[in-house]
Image (spheres, rainbow, N blue to C red):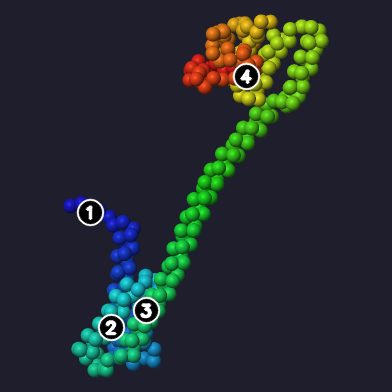
Amino acid sequence: MKIFPLDSSARTSAIKWSESIVLPFSFIAIGYLIDPLDPLFLQNHFPWLIVAPVLICLRYGFLYGLVTTSLIISSITFALYLKWPQPFDFPKETVLGLVIIAFISSEFYEFWNRKITAIKYEFNYIKTRMENFSRSYNLIKSSHYYLEQHLASQTKSLRLTLSDLERKIFSLTANKEESLPDIGLNILRIFSDYANVQAASLYMTDPEKKLIPQPVAYIGGDSLIASPDDPVIKEALKLGFSTILFSSIRAILSSRKFI
């Protein structure tokens, strides 16, 4: 025979029902030990049996408190029928007060239970938002860290690099030298350092605006031989600036060639 353990909710429910049933009889037993002739505390100035349903109602709510109240009233009725431990009159005021106190205590429990439930929902919402914020913060923090490392590894800023390149171009132009083959690699390195370009090639055109297939500089592996029949290259030569054809995007991406 295989026995499966009760889950936490089932154990909690069993404890609630056990306390609701055992507590009123415990009060009667204590009353019998204190005064065997008045175990129900009916002759006392204060009806101590009322404490049992108040405790249960405040702790577990109306349903459990109703069970405790019903058991106490049933015990009083049964004792009256058996005339135990001695004959007595039915305590109408005590029973009525017992029921009223049980209702009031249950209402107090329901009020605070609603407030606690609302606070729990608000806490869970704030906790979820805080977790999302923490993940976003850690992501931004790590990205800033890598950005700082990237900037720290560079000896010169982009502005200084472009200024040096401009001075070199002016120097080559003043000496009437061909500037692009001499500064091509520097241009590609700027794209590599500041734009994260991993592979690129730089090409020249002849005086007739025709493409020279051999690159003057390249980075990121072997150089590529440009095809003058490439539609993107034709469009770039026609317009005179960088361009891309939407009809050729898929072919360009597959060949990893950009103009």
Residue 221: % across, % down: 57, 13
Residue 119: % across, % down: 48, 62
State which tag comes first along the sequence, 3 or 1: 1
Residue 232: % across, % down: 56, 15
The residue positioned farthest toward the left in the image shown: 1
- What is the spatial separation of the Cα atoms under label 1 and label 2, in whole angstroms? 38 Å
Q: Secondary structure at mark 4?
A: loop
Q: Secondary structure at mark 2?
A: helix
Residue 176: % across, % down: 79, 6
Q: Nearer the viewer, residue 184 or 204?
A: 204
State which tag comes first along the sequence, 3 or 2: 2
Residue located beneath label 2 in the image: 73
Residue located beneath label 4 in the image: 242
Mark 4 in CB contact with mark 1 (< 8 angstroms): no
Residue located beneath label 1 in the image: 3
Q: Nearer the viewer, residue 188 or 33?
A: 188
The residue positioned farthest toward the right in the image shown: 174
Give the total number of marks visible in the rendering: 4
State which tag comes first along the sequence, 4 or 1: 1
